Amino acid sequence: MSILRRSAQAALLLGLVSFSAVPAFAQAGQKEEKSEVKLPALVVGSKAPALSIEKWVKGQPVTTLEKGKVYMVEFWATWCPPCIASMPHISELQKKYGDKGLTVIGVSTKDKRGNTLEKTEKMVADKGDTMGYTVAWDKDRETMDAWFAAAGQDGIPCSFLVDQNGFIAYIGLPTQIDKTLELVLANKHDIKALAADYKKGKENEAKVQASLEEYGKLKESEDFAAAVKKLDEVLALDPKMAGAAVERFKVQTENLKDYDKAASDATAYFIDGGGNDNAQAMNFVAWSIVDPESELGHVDVDLALKLATKANELTKNEDPAIMDTLARVHFTKGNFDKAVEIETTAVEKSASNKKLQADLKKSLEEFKDAQAKKSKG
C-alpha cells in the first residue's frame, strides 16, 4: 500500500467524530462533561457578540453587525487544509447571496501552530478570487474567544450565521450552512426551533462521544462483538458518521472474520443508508478489499465493485485515487481491459500530484502486463 493511501486511510479513521474539521485551539481549564450535557455560553439562539478586529485584510470593514443584514462569520487558519478546501464554497455563497444581504467575514487569529498576520495576508493575496469575501485579522484573539471559544468549539473551519435580528442561527461547518442560510435570507427561519434543534444535536453529540469511548475500551479488551454493537449505537445516533461504519467493517473482517455480516452492513450503509453520499469512505472500504497488501482472509470483490463504482459516480469520474481503486477492482476480477482503460484516465487526471501519479503508473504497467499475457492465451 502506498504512503498516500496509508495516510488517507489513517486520516479517515482518526476522523470518527468529524471528517471536515481539524482541532484548533484547546481552551485552558476546559473540562469534559461526562454526565448531564452542559451547553456552552454561546449557542444557536444567542445574541451575536461584537467583532474585535485588528486589521481588515480584504474587503470593507464591518464595524458593527447591522440589523436587517445577514452575516456569516467563519474562523479559519492558514495551516488548516479543510479551511482551504472550503474557500471556494464560501466564495460562491458570497457571490450568490451578496445582493440579498449576506456578508461573509473570514476571521483568522494568532495561535501556537504558526498562524500569523503575515501568512494570512500572503494567502489572501495568493488565493485571489478563491477567497471572494471579507477577511479580517483578530485583535488579540478577542473575537475568537467571544465566538469560537464561547461556543465550545474545538475544530476549524467553523462558521456562525447571524440573522437579521442579530441572533445566531447556525454554528458549524461552512460546507453545511446552505439550507439554514437560504431560510435566513428569506426570513423564513424560526430561531427558537433552530435553537432547540441545536441543543438536541449537542446532547446527541455527547451520547456519540460516550459510545465511542466505550467502543475504544471494548476493542482494547478484545471484546470485538460488543465493540461492533457500540459502533452500531454510534451510527444509530449519527447516521452520517461514515468513519464508524468504516471501523465497523474493519473489526468485522479483521477481528471477527464475519465477512458476510461485514458485507451486508456495508451494503446497507453505503448503498442505501447514511453513507450513500460519502465517496471517500466507500473508497476506503473498497480499497481495503482489493489492496494487494490486504490481510483480509476473504475478498468480497463484488462488494468492492459496488462501492468503488458508486464512489466514482459521486466524484464524477474526476478523482484519480478513487478511479485507481475501481481499476484495481476490475483487475482483481480479471477484467484487464477495463482496468487498463480506467487506470489510464486516472494517470492523466493525477498530473498535478506527481507522487500519486507515479503510484498509478506502476499499477497501470501491472495491469497492462496482465492484459498482454491474457491476449497471448
Image (cartoon, rainbow, N blue to C red):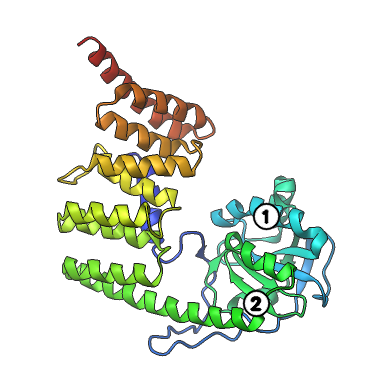
User: Residue 71 lies in what quarter of the image?
Assistant: bottom right
- Residue at the (45%, 53%) spot, across then down: 277
- In screen coordinates, is 114 left or right of 73? left
Image: 230 above or below 96: below
Where is residue 81 drawn, in percent x and y? 55, 53
- In screen coordinates, is 325 left or right of 181? left
Disc with the residue nearer the chain's start (2 vs 1): 1
Question: Does the image show residue 109?
Answer: no
Q: Looking at the figure, which quarter contains the C terminus?
A: top left
Q: Amino acid at mark 1?
A: Lys
Where is residue 215 drawn, in percent x and y? 27, 71
Q: Amino acid at mark 2?
A: Trp
Where is residue 367 drawn, in percent x and y? 31, 23
Question: Does the image show residue 125?
Answer: yes
- Report crowding for label 1: few under 14, some 14 to 19, many 20 or more residues within 10 A (C-alpha): some
- Report crowding for label 2: few under 14, some 14 to 19, many 20 or more residues within 10 A (C-alpha): many
Image: 52 above or below 39: above
In this rendered view, identify the residue nearer to me: 108 or 72. 72
